[in-house]
Image: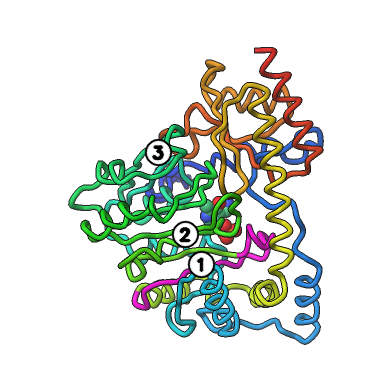
Amino acid sequence: MKTWSMSEMISPMVKQIPPSGIRKFFSLAEGNKDIISLGVGEPDFVTPEHVRAACVRALELGKTTYTPNAGLLELREEIASYLYNSFQVKYEPSNEIIVTVGGSEAIDLALRALITKGDEIIVPVPSYVAYSPIAQLNGGKVIEVETFAKDDFKLTAEALKAGLTPRSKVLIINYPSNPTGAMMTYEDWLPIAKVVEDNNLIVISDEIYAELTYDSKHVSFATLPGMKDRTLLISGFSKAFAMTGWRIGYACGNQELIAAMLKIHQYTVMCAPIIGQIAAIESLRNGLGEKDRMMESYNQRRRMFVKGLREIGLPCHEPRGAFYAFPSIAHTGLDSDSFAQKLLFEAGVATVPGHVFGQGGEGFIRCSYASSVSRLTEALERIDRCLRAL
Ligand code: PMP
């Protein structure tokens, strides 16, 4: 006779976290060709041909082994010069950079390396869905600080201060932002840096959309006075280089923190896949032109899609980076989950309800515009019909 249930065996830490709300909507749309998916944050470009060819060559040469735990030194060197040339941040390839399995692993390692039970992690919301669950899995307490459409979803020093307590330890920032497309200027960051300094916070800066900016250049938080040593910069190849499936990301920062992350990484994944690392080297050496062309294409789609949303009556603040529009649906009288379900089941358009991105996301839906212009046009028509039928 069975005297136990698997459910009882599963850690309460895992039970407390919800499954990803993005994946839920994605799964509903999967396999149905009639559904236009604006749900998943993934480039619609295939990785450029020369990058794929470099990998085929590497495979033919038998490059199928582990790499150093921190990643191929050649790749860390390329990352260091790329970050310096693009964003004027300087990191030492030998001990300030770790190559990870996507930016996702970097977020996980950082939170595992930093959090002790009861530490508070400040997360400006609406935010990317992974931060809070991973912080909670490590015993951290997440403090959400709200950002608002009226401020273009920028983080303000006042909001940050309101989230502080003596247990505050880590601030997670993500600009350009998923899901809002918001960006912060150097001047916007200065008062935040002061609060960080005054309250001895560590900053995890997820800059995975740093290249996808349309109106002004991305400011890396580590370039703010006094912030470099307090900041862990996280980025990767998934978005700007159209390489989601290769699973290559990285983290750069203080060498003690990188060493602590490396220790966990050694025991859990050993190293990021060698083929992905070779692809990443090729992207940085010879793929910057393609990256810029892809950005130009996202920018065109951003303009047409945001204009289209406004024309059909969905107010939308201007997304200045990444590839998401975050229109308000508040005036429909429906909550974001009901609205997104209506769009999915009645109009055949998959979006993500804003509430999955935390407090302040309710009343909005996230639409990824990394889709073809014809699909976006069709999606707008369908959303329009759905709105009229309300
Ligand atoms: N950060 C943000 C803000 C993201 O949107 C994503 C992917 N959706 C990631 C990190 C993780 O990306 P990856 O693991 O593919 O590098």
Residue pictured at 44% horizontal, 75% vertical: 262
Q: For this view, does 231 lie left or right of residue 362?
A: left
Q: Nearer the viewer, residue 373 or 356?
A: 373
Q: Quadrant of the C terminus?
A: top right
Q: Secondary structure at mark 1?
A: helix
Mark toward the start of the polypeptide (2 vs 1): 1
Instruction: Say what amino acid the circle numbered 1 marks.
Output: Phe
Residue at label 1? Answer: 87
Q: Secondary structure at mark 3?
A: loop
Q: What is the x, y in percent for residue 89?
A: 46, 71
Mark 2 to mark 1 CA distance (whole Å) = 7 Å
Q: Which residues are magenta?
A: 237-256
Does mark 1's beta carbon lie closer than 8 Å to ligand 1? no
Residue contact at pointers 2 and 1, CB within 8 angstroms:
yes
Q: How is the image coloured?
A: rainbow
Q: Nearer the viewer, residue 221 or 121?
A: 221
Mark 3 to mark 1 CA distance (whole Å) = 25 Å
274 above or below 41?
Answer: below
Residue contact at pointers 3 and 1, CB within 8 angstroms:
no
Mark 2 Cα shell of 10 Å, populated few (<14), some (14-19), many (≥20): many
Give the numbered dot on residue 147: 3
Does mark 3's beta carbon lie closer than 8 Å to ligand 1? no
Residue at label 2? Answer: 219
Residue pictured at 28% horizontal, 42% vertical: 158
